[in-house]
Image (tube, rainbow, N blue to C red):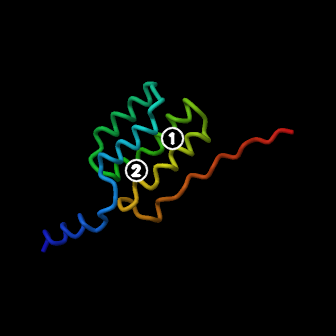
Amino acid sequence: MANSLFSRRQTAAPDRLSLEQIRERLYAALLDCKDMGAQRVIYRINVAATPSELWLLRSDLHQCIARVHDQAEATRRTNLLLDAFEGWVPSHQLKLIPEPVRDSQT
């Protein structure tokens, strides 16, 4: 019975990305981030054992991108990763990060 439950869980979402494919998406988001903080995040991406562990790295990834670019770019790149976690993370958690409010100076 446990084996059939495990098998069903494994085939429940055949179109979801593999752990390696999710890793590749995270690496791509950090491609132009070369500082020590980004290296730490890349290490944590490498050692993550599950998609859930990778999901929890989004905040760190966002911070690395924001240090190199800005918050708007970090938000854009982080939001582009949501679909990589479909089928792995409960859908109610797959929410976009709101775009930062830009100061309007006139």
Residue for badge 1: 62
- In this view, the residue in front, 14 or 8, is 14
Residue 35 position in % (x across, y down): 46, 25
Specify the amino acid type for callout 2: Trp
**Identity of the residue drawn at 19% across and 71% down:** 5
Going by the image, does 101 lie left or right of 71? right
Which residue of the protein is positioned furthest toward the bottom in this rendering? 1
Identified at 56% across, 45% down, the residue is: 76
Where the C terminus falls, by quadrant?
top right
Examine the image and state in which quarter residue 73 appears.
top right
Q: Check disc 2 and report the residue beneath it.
A: 55
x 52%, y 58%: residue: 95
**Mark earlier in primary sequence (1, 2):** 2
**Going by the image, does 82 lie left or right of 100?**
left
Determine the residue positioned at 36% across, 62% down.
Answer: 87
Instruction: Say which quadrant the N terminus sits in.
Output: bottom left
What element does badge 1 sit on?
helix
Dot 2 alpha-carbon crowd within 10 angstroms: few under 14, some 14 to 19, many 20 or more: many
